[in-house]
Image (cartoon, rainbow, N blue to C red):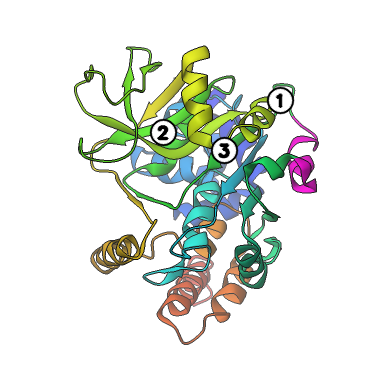
Amino acid sequence: MDENKIGKAISYLRKRAGYTQKDLADRIGISDKAVSKWERGIGLPDVGYLRKLSILLDTDTDSLLAGDVVHHDGSWSGIIILDENSYDIGAGTVIYDKPLIYYLISYFLLVGIRDIVVSCTKKDAEYIDRTLGKGGDYGIRIDTVTGGLRDITANKAFNHICLKESSTDGRNIMMVYGRCLLYGVDQTRFFQKAMMNRDRFTMLVLPKKMSHQSSRIVMDQNKKVINSNADEPLKTQYDFSDIPILFFPESLLPTIAGEKDISTFIARYANDHELYVHMLDRGFVEIEVDDWNNVQEASVFMKIVQDKCGMNVYCIEEVAWRRGMIGLEQLKVLGLKYAGTEYGDYILSLHDNLSEKSITELGLK
């Protein structure tokens, strides 16, 4: 490993994320002198710090240790397709202790995507505006498009995504096109790996029971889909099925928007082009929230995870702070919005613990 190259990568990604050396050190729990040494190529981060460091810098450990910053130019935008649901399950539907839209928005925050368009009903758009506004309080920008997928390219929000200044490689899109609750270890890392090959149309898959309604996926050794027909024999060790999260060059968006639905586009694209998948590990859980039984199932699951792990899953305020999108004081402001609730108390406890830690480290107590 090239210590100088890794140091330069850490320095570049830190500055891109808007951290000072002390900011980064405080979030990891070390001194700013240690960060300075890393960036000057004098030693490497301990193994125990690598995972947290890669999360804070919006990268993965493999890229960080390779000194690779090519894929971290911020030229990704996000789209959420939240179509009307016959059970009236939408952006404001509460899954245990937070609305569905918080879970969906969090996917983008985890990988540092700040520009997000939500295609939804008028009712959902009004809810998002009331609760999140334009996203400025969270260090992001949210636009809503009322209408289906075909309407998105005609809206100014589409132009906001695709016509803003882009990198030399062009812009890319991460799309979530369903009410998908995903939970598993190192989820951010899997997302980031799917974003590495920016010229490919890539979808996420994970092992599921054969009785599941999602499309069964068969792929070759290069992770290229060679069959998506559920009637054909399975040719992989596990039964992989698709989940509704996609990564693709923005040049494909008009074609996707012109199709009847996303599934139709994927089926057609798989026949005519190279469609790649990124496989999540066994142990990941995806719950599709399409009816009220799903809502109850997802709520029970999230309650168990949070009670047993002692953390709040998909707390967008915490994710925004840990990704450097907001500062510590803004974290407190957002926590006060929910003062008196368990959710608000969790956010405020983060602020108080972090403030106490800073005071102690500065020798003021």
Residue at coordinates 65% horizontally, 72% vertically from top-left?
130
Which residue does the image show at 63% across and 47% down from the upper left? 148
User: Front-most of 229 and 82?
Assistant: 229
* Residue 170's disc number: 1
Work out how far the residue at label 1 is from the one at label 2, CA to CA, in angstroms.
22 Å
In the image, what residue type sits under mark 3? Met
The picture quadrant where one finds residue 152 is: top right
Magenta residues?
154-166
Q: Amino acid at mark 2?
A: Leu
Residue 264 in the image: above or below residue 188:
above
Residue shown at 26% from the left, 69% from the top: 307
Does dot 2 land on a helix, a strand or a loop? strand
As drawn, is 233 to the left or to the right of 312? left
In the rendered image, residue 190, in percent from the top left (x then y), is placed at 41, 35
At 73% from the left and 27% from the top, the residue drawn is 167
Residue matched to label 2: 204
Q: Secondary structure at mark 3?
A: strand
Q: Residue 41's spot in the image, x, y percent?
A: 54, 29
* Mark 1 and mark 2 residues within 8 Å of each other at the beta carbon: no
Cα–Cα span, label 3 and label 1: 14 Å
